[in-house]
Image (tube, helix red, strand yellow):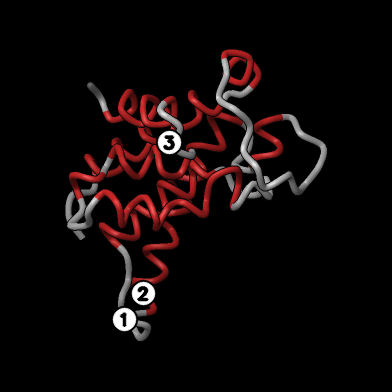
Amino acid sequence: MTRKEQAMEYFKEGYNCAQAVVLAFADLTDLDKSTLLRLSSSFGGGFGRMREICGSVSGMGIILGILYGVDDSSQKEDKAAHYARIQEVAKKFEEKNGSIVCRELLGLAQKHDNPTPEERTESYYKKRPCVELVGDSAEILEEYIAKNPGK
């Protein structure tokens, strides 16, 4: 199973969009599944269902931070390089999907949403492109990592 397929399956299992992407790359980290799930749990629904940055895009950022992130505040060049990395994958996602903003991707007019997630029913999956968006993020991230091994 590809990472794209894994991420899509994790979403279908009920994990949020950020968690689904992060779990598909768990084997590349030194963190256990529970820690990864807690770390990415706030980013679903465009950051706590506020419909801001798509959680799958945030999931890419979480994995890139774990793999390539900066842990020394004095390393300004490394920080800039990391931000360029984040912007690169976000741009690829935006080029493919037209936006990185959750509410725009879902065609919603309101900015904030009820904090209670909708039931994952057949009609939910028909009206939401989230499964495909999670797959797109995993595919973009996998391509990036393959072209940029190691920090």
Q: Secondary structure at mark 1?
A: loop
Is 89 placed left or right of 124 in the picture? left
Mark 2 Cα within 10 Å, few/some/many (few <14, many 20+)? few
**Image location of residue 54, percent across then percent down:** 57, 43
**Image location of residue 100, percent across then percent down:** 59, 42
Q: Amino acid at mark 3?
A: Ser
Q: Residue at x 55, y 25 (%)?
A: 120
Which one is closest to the eye, mark 1 or mark 2?
1
In this rendering, the answer to whether 140 lies above or below 112 is above
**Image location of residue 50, percent across then percent down:** 68, 50
**Image location of residue 12, percent across then percent down:** 44, 25
Q: Which residue is mark 2?
A: 77
Q: Which residue is mark 3?
A: 137
Mark closer to the chain start, 3 or 2: 2
Mark closer to the chain start, 1 or 3: 1
- 84 and 131: which is toward the camera: 131
Image quadrant holding the C terminus, namely bottom left
Mark closer to the chain start, 1 or 2: 1
CA separation in Å, label 1 and label 3: 27 Å
Q: Residue at x 50, y 30 (%)?
A: 133
Q: Residue at x 36, y 25 (%)?
A: 9
Mark 3 Cα within 10 Å, few/some/many (few <14, many 20+)? many
Q: Amino acid at mark 2?
A: Glu
User: Which label is found at residue 120?
Assistant: none
Q: Secondary structure at mark 2?
A: helix
Q: Residue at x 35, y 45 (%)?
A: 22
Q: Which residue is mark 1?
A: 72
CA separation in Å, label 3 and label 2: 26 Å
Q: Amino acid at mark 1?
A: Asp
Contact (Cβ within 8 Å) of mark 1 with mark 3: no
